[in-house]
Image (cartoon, grey):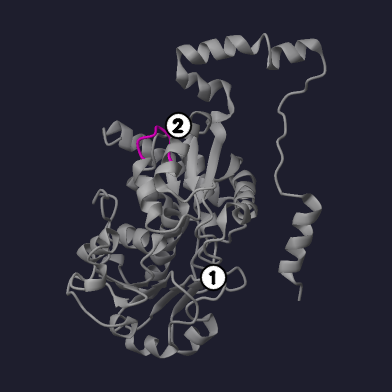
Amino acid sequence: MADIYKESITLHKRKRGKLEIKSKVEVKTREDLSRVYTPGVAEVSRQIAKDESKAYEFTIKHNSVAIVSDGSAVLGLGNIGPYAAIPVMEGKAILFKEYANIDAFPITVKTQNSFEIINLVKNISPVFGGVNLEDISAPRCFEIEDALQKVGIPVFHDDQHGTAIVLLAALINSAKLAGKKLTDLKVVINGAGAAGTAIANLLLCVGYDPKVCEPVREIIVCDSEGIINKTRSDIQNNPYKMRLASITNRQNREGKLSDAIEDADVFIGVSKGKIFDPRFIKKMNEKAIILAMANPIPEIMPDKAKEAGAFIVGTGRSDFPNQVNNVLAFPGVFRGALDARAKTITNHMKIMAAFALAQSVDKPTVENILPSPLDKSVVPAIAKAVKKAYEFDVSQGMV
């Protein structure tokens, strides 16, 4: 079996990075030079100075995304800093180009101060059509994204919303196969960080138009200390976990993950590997759905979950069936947002992205609830749905 880590080191060292800038025009004559630079470009600048929206017509802004990270929560590696984050953000930029033909630029910043990152994004926003916040730790990721929603271009934290969109799509098809309705599901989420919080919000339709979103019946969220509830003394000074407590766990249950999983239909893992005991599945309802997305080691390995009686199992890994991976969502979401010249990414857009992704699988099976991450036909479908949702929101005065 190939050593993928060694091969990756060899590739990066040989290429010295994975990105380069390529010109769309040739500069071979004085006339070429005069058109692309001085003096001809002065007229382009004058027109944009009169009407800033012309930047979308005349510049890279119409098709560019900044991938902004402080390196504080990179993959499963943790707080490794802005230099070590560069190859990951380069990789994401390649996926933007490969899947959605979007010009994306890695911008890793040497600060983990939320105020400084917010100001930086505001100040670089003129050249970009959107911003993908990436690998920024909770709770700062919430503060940063919230503060940037009125910057005039879409700002989207993929670790939150990309994960939630793909998860919802997986759950739509899994519930259908299990013969269950989304609105009847009892869901347990293990992990109360960026992804877990966004998944809870999406599944409960928090802030979403009820016309396009029907909430699941019940969600219980667990962190490393157990079930999140309103009476836990250790979260009283954590506004983000207290907010989770206010919208989940309606019966204010207490205890550990083993208590939360009683009579659950779905387990969603966005935490760490090997924390889900196979015996827990016996406590769940029939046709249990297990979406264990910790990387590289899921909360429970698929073979163990299947042996214990799970109906459907998904992970974040590409070497098992049912890979729940953000690459299925973010290229199409940004493609649709850029095509719509959106100023924000609305809740409606996220919901429609999830349904478009779920519908991209013609005939779901227990080992095929989502399309392959290599299936490039998914992006146009999501982009179309996202663009349509934004245009609807604008027409209804919701943006």
166 relative to 281, above or below: above
Q: Amino acid at mark 1?
A: Asn
Q: Which residue is mark 1?
A: 295
Instruction: Identify the residue at image location x=26%, y=34%.
Output: 396
Foreground of the two, 372 or 43:
43
On residue 341, which mark appears?
Answer: 2
Kind of residue at badge 2: Arg
Q: What residue do we see at 43% from left, 80% from top? A: 311
Q: Which residue corresponds to the image point at 45% horizontal and 76% vertical from the top-left?
A: 312
On the rendered structure, is 239 left or right of 149? left
* Residue 46 lies within the magenta run: no
Q: Does dot 1 land on a helix, a strand or a loop?
A: loop
Task: Please determine whether, in this image, residue 284 is positioned above or below residue 194.
Answer: below
Q: Image check: 35 left or right of 395?
A: right
Q: Where in the figure is residue 294, as x and y percent of width and height?
A: 49, 71
Name the one closer to the observer, 126 or 309: 126
Q: Quadrant of residue 310?
A: bottom left
* Label disc, if present, on residue 48 of the rendered structure: none
Compare residues 112 and 44 and report the one nearer the observer.
112
Label 2 SS: loop
